[in-house]
Amino acid sequence: MHNSVFFKSVINSNSLFDSMGLLGQYLKDTIGCEQICLFLMEDSQRQEPAAYSYNMLQFDINQLQQIAVQADFFERVPDGRPLSEDDKLDGASLKETSFHTIYPFHINRNSTNGTLLLCFQSQRSLTSEELQICRIIKLHMDQLVDKIYFRKQFLRQQSYESLFNTLRMKDSFTVDHCYNVAFYSSLLGEKVGLSSNELELLKLAALLHDIGKLAIPDHILMKPGRLTDEEFDVIRQHPAIGYELLKDLPEVHDILPIVRWHHERIDGKGYPDGLKGDEIPFLVRIVSLADAFDAMTSTRVYRSSLHVKEVRKQLVTNANTQFDEQLVHQFLDIIDEQMTMRTLINGE
C-alpha cells in the first residue's frame, strides 16, 4: 500500500469495521499480529459491549468479551503491558482462548470505554519500536471513535439533519470533506487548548461550513476541469449562501461566522467580506486551515491529491497571508506527528 494511504485512512473510514480491517493488515505486516479485537461500551449501555475484530474466530471473540467485561476492560493493566496465560484477571484466564499473549490498549473517549486487543497465538515480546507503532495506532482508534461519536450526535440534531442529508444526496464528496474538516479542526482545537464546549461548537460549525454548496449547480460543483472565472464567481457565493440557509435555524448564532467567513484570509484578500487579520474570529481561522489542508490532500475530479510534504510547504508559504501564522505552526506539529506514525508503520 502506498505510504500516504494510511495518513488519511482512519478519518476516511466510515465505520469501525472498515478501520479494523485496515489496521489488522498493517499490524500483520509490521509486527506479525494476525488477530485483533476491539470492545467498546457506551456509558448508557447495559448490555454486552460491541465487538469488532479482524481475522478472529467467533469463539475467541466471545471468550475475550467475557474476560474483558470481568476485568473492567483491563483498566488496571498499563497500555502495552503483555498479558499471558499465567495472568489472573479477576478470575478469568487467557487459557480459555486460543492466545498465549495479548497486548491491551485502552479506549476512553467521550462516553465510550473499551479496549483494543492485539492477540498472538504464541509467546511474543514486542520491541520498543513495535510498541510505539501500536500506541500510535491506538491514538488513531481513539480519533475514529471520536469521529463516529460526533456523527451520531450530529444526526440527532434535527435542525441540521435534513439540510445535511440533502447535501449528501447532491455531493457525497463534499460531505466526506466536511467530516474531515471537522476532524482536523478538532485536532487543532485540542492542541491550542479549546474548552470542551468550544470544541463541540467548532466541530459542528466545521461540519456545516460548506452547506451553501447545496445551491451551486452540479455542472459547476462537479466539473472535471479548471473552472472559468465566471464559474469560480459562482463557487465563491457558497459561504454567503450557507449563512442564509442557516441563519433562521435555532441556536446557530455562534456557527454562522464560521460558515460565512471560512474563506477569508489574514491579508484581507478572501471572500465574501474581505476581513483582515484580527477581524477574522479565532475559530474561523482554525476551520480555514483545516479546510485548505483537506482540500490539498484529497483527490478531486480535476486533480490528484498533493503529497503531504508539498502541502506542508504550501502552509508555510501562506502563513500570515492566507492563514494564521501561529495556527500553521501548531498544525505543522500535528502533521509531523502523523508523518512520524506513517514512517514507523511503513519503515521509511
Image: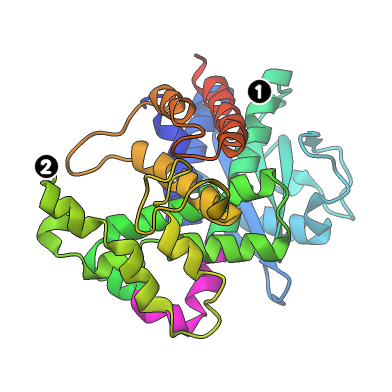
- Residue that appears at 64% across and 59% down: 199
Q: Can residue 58 be seen in this view?
A: no
Q: Which of 90 and 225 is in front in this view?
A: 225
Residue 338 lies in quadrant? top right
Residue under label 2: 225
**Residue 153: in magenta span:** yes
Asked whether, in this view, residue 46 is left or right of residue 4, the answer is right
Residue 321 position within the rendered picture, expressed as x and y whole percent measured from the top left: 46, 35
Q: What residue type is labelled 2?
A: Gly
Against 343, is 263 above or below?
below
Q: Is residue 53 left or right of residue 178?
A: right
Please report the residue visible at 50 percent of the width from the left and 55 percent of the height from the top.
182
**Residue 46, position as x, y percentages in the image:** 72, 77
Q: Where is residue 247 drawn, in percent x and y?
A: 43, 79
- Stretch of the chain drawn in magenta: 148-163
Front-most of residues 284 and 347: 284
Q: How crowded is mark 1: few (under 14 residues within 10 Å), some or many (20 or more)?
A: some
Disc 2, SS: loop
Q: Can residue 155 be seen in this view?
A: yes
Displayed quadrant of residue 208? bottom left
- Which class describes the residues within 10 Å of circle 2: few (<14), some (14-19), or many (20+)? few
Look at label 1 and name its amino acid.
Answer: Glu
Q: Does the magenta stretch include residue 321?
A: no
Q: Nearer the viewer, residue 90 or 188?
A: 188
Q: Are marks 1 and 2 in contact (CB under 8 Å)?
A: no
302 in relation to 202, above or below: above
Quarter that holds the N terminus: top left
- Helix or strand or loop: what does disc 1 sit on? helix
Left or right relative to 313: residue 94: right
Q: Nearest the camera: 110 or 182?
A: 182
Q: Nearer the viewer, mark 1 or mark 2?
A: 2
Label number found at residue 130: 1
